[in-house]
Amino acid sequence: MENADGVRSPYRSVADWIEDTGTELLTRRREEAEAIFRKIGITFAVYGEGGDPERLIPFDLIPRVFAASEWSVLENGIRQRARALNAFLYDIYHRGEIIKAGIVPGELVYQNAAYLPQMVGFSPPGRVYSQIVGIDIVRTGPDKFQVLEDNCRTPSGVSYMLENREIMTRMFPDIFTGGPVRSVDHYPDELLRTLMEVAPAACTGEPTVVLLTPGSLNSAYYEHSFLADLMGIELVEPKDLFVDDARVWMRTTHGPKQVDVIYRRIDDDYLDPLTFRPDSLLGIPGLFDAYRAGYVNICSAPGAGVADDKAIYIYVPEMIRFYLREEPILENIQTFQCGRKDECKYVLENIDDLVVKEVHGSGGYGMLIGPKSTKAEIEAYRQRILADPGNFIAQPTLNLSTAPTLHEREISGRHVDFRPFCLVGKTIRLVPGGLTRVALQPGSLVVNSSQGGGVKDTWVLRE
């Protein structure tokens, strides 16, 4: 609902705050925020492009705001989707009922690079495969939210959700002291509680939880260390762990300590050189056997990446109907599979007006935005599709919603998306907020940090 001046009701207090503060002070505060981010090391790495790989993600001080009623719809839809995705992962590694029913084509699952035959017949604790589900959502109308993609392996960005709020609280404390914005500060506690809930049955005492990182050169290392610190658990590298007698142990100054739950931020292929890539220098020999024996849980489960696939995404609404016997609360974006001959024909004939993505792509790479591309770029991409149609999907160029953004001392609308983080253990938890990413260039639809996008604090208002 808009007021007479065109400001939507949830943004009324923000508009008043901006008017009282002024763009000059907001600009100075933004510069201060970025200096703080740099000082404490909140950067991400982009390698292979020359120069300094350590970059700040630009931070915009003007928040993204959801009314309580909007959040209620989003929360219910996100929870529903997380339940269905975990049910799907259990099914495809057991009876495959959704494939037998003719709903999801078997080749999309069993020929998927993320599908792990080693997981067939094995059930992780609580049948939870993805304990942290990141759902990317866009607003496409005044009261319409749609899902852009699902992230079931290791969705990143939650450190920015927390640090953005910390910076805003530090710079504008009056807004949050007894104000209308709901807190996200309890996310680390909720994450730890979730991880402890999915400890293996062999764990009889309080579970020992660790966060497994590839090391300080990883692009998300800041987030790894940040989350481990907030949860009060050990941040470990593969060299810190070893397997003995089918159990995983952590090297400590007091001797070996058994590990029950591993929140891993290492890809499947590199987890265990005895089971997956034998040339992995990051793997822990014997880890997968310890996992299958029920002495340790790996979160998220190996093989959960099947549910991230953009070709699988198309079928999530049907998963909800099949497994939950419910109608989807959040819609998908209309999506065309180039692996289907008739849909590929449509995509090739209308490529100028579509967004085309690699099925396994991420980070905004390997994507074509038809209306923003040159004829040469479109023709080159057309040849890629013809060479391997099944590797691509296409979607309409969306009329994404915009949010007010401070850019070069002026406030104007920029396209945004939203990634909430849903935690799945014995119960499903969702803090009222998430990561809002913003396309800082005028007219741009690409919000990924690796492609020049920025971030905002996300406010969910109380009733």
Image: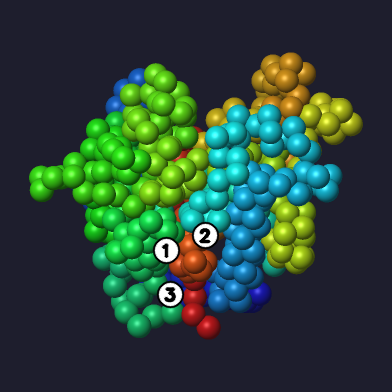
Label 1, label 2: how many angstroms apart (C-alpha)?
9 Å
Q: Is residue 44 left or right of residue 72?
A: left
Q: State the image coordinates of residue 445 (x, y, percent, origin top left).
A: 60, 42
Return the residue nearer the eye: 395 or 6. 395
Q: Amino acid at mark 2?
A: Gly
Return the residue nearer the eye: 295 or 378. 295
Residue drawn at 58 percent across, 68 percent down: 75
Mark 2 against mark 3, which lies toward the viewer? 2
Label 3, label 1: how many angstroms apart (C-alpha)?
29 Å
- Mark 1 sits on what residue? 197
Residue drawn at 62 percent across, 69 percent down: 76
Mark 3 against mark 1, which lies toward the viewer? 1
Q: Which mark is residue 124?
A: none
Q: Indicate the quadrant where residue 77 lies.
A: bottom right
Q: Amino acid at mark 1?
A: Glu
Q: In the rendered view of the protein, which quadrant contains the N terminus?
A: bottom right
- Mark 3 sits on what residue? 181
Residue drawn at 31 percent across, 59 percent down: 207
Secondary-structure class at tag 2: helix
